[in-house]
Amino acid sequence: MPPLPDAHCRYVSEWVATKLRWGLSADQGEAEALKAYAQGPCEASVVHYTTAL
């Protein structure tokens, strides 16, 4: 995570967008961490992505 808390939600959103864009999976620990942010401080964040060809 970035050192500044104000950057956490953007970082998480971009991380998820990259996973979705390229069809990548997440291990259990990663998925749980992303879920914690999605249900907590980043619940208002929207993830935008385009699927890779």
Image (cartoon, grey):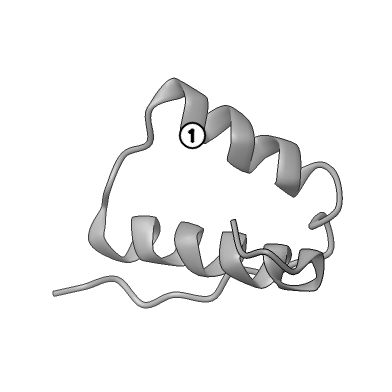
The answer to whether residue 23 is above or below residue 18 is: above
Which of the pair 24/30 is nearer the observer? Answer: 30
Sort mark 1 into few (<14), some (14-19) or many (20+) by Cα contacts within 10 Å: few
Left or right, 24 with respect to 40, comes to left
Which of the pair 2/51 is nearer the observer? Answer: 2
Place of residue 3 in the rendered image (x, y in percent of width and height, measured from the top left): 68, 64
Place of residue 11 in the rendered image (x, y in percent of width and height, measured from the top left): 58, 67
Rendered residue at 36%/56% (across/down): 19
Given the image, on which type of amino acid does mark 1 rest?
Answer: Glu
Say what secondary structure mark 1 lies in. helix
Image quarter where the C terminus lies is bottom left
Which of the pair 7/22 is nearer the observer? Answer: 7
Place of residue 15 in the rendered image (x, y in percent of width and height, measured from the top left): 47, 61
Image quarter where the N terminus lies is bottom right
- Rendered image quadrant of residue 52: bottom left
Left or right, 16 with respect to 36, comes to left
The answer to whether residue 37 is above or below residue 44 is: above
In the displayed image of the protein, which residue is found farthest to the front?
3
In the displayed image of the protein, which residue is found farthest to the top?
28
Rendered residue at 38%/27% (across/down): 27
Rendered residue at 65%/72% (across/down): 10
Q: Which residue is mark 1?
A: 30
Left or right, 42 with respect to 27, comes to right
In the displayed image of the protein, which residue is found farthest to the left?
53
The answer to whether residue 26 is above or below residue 19 is: above
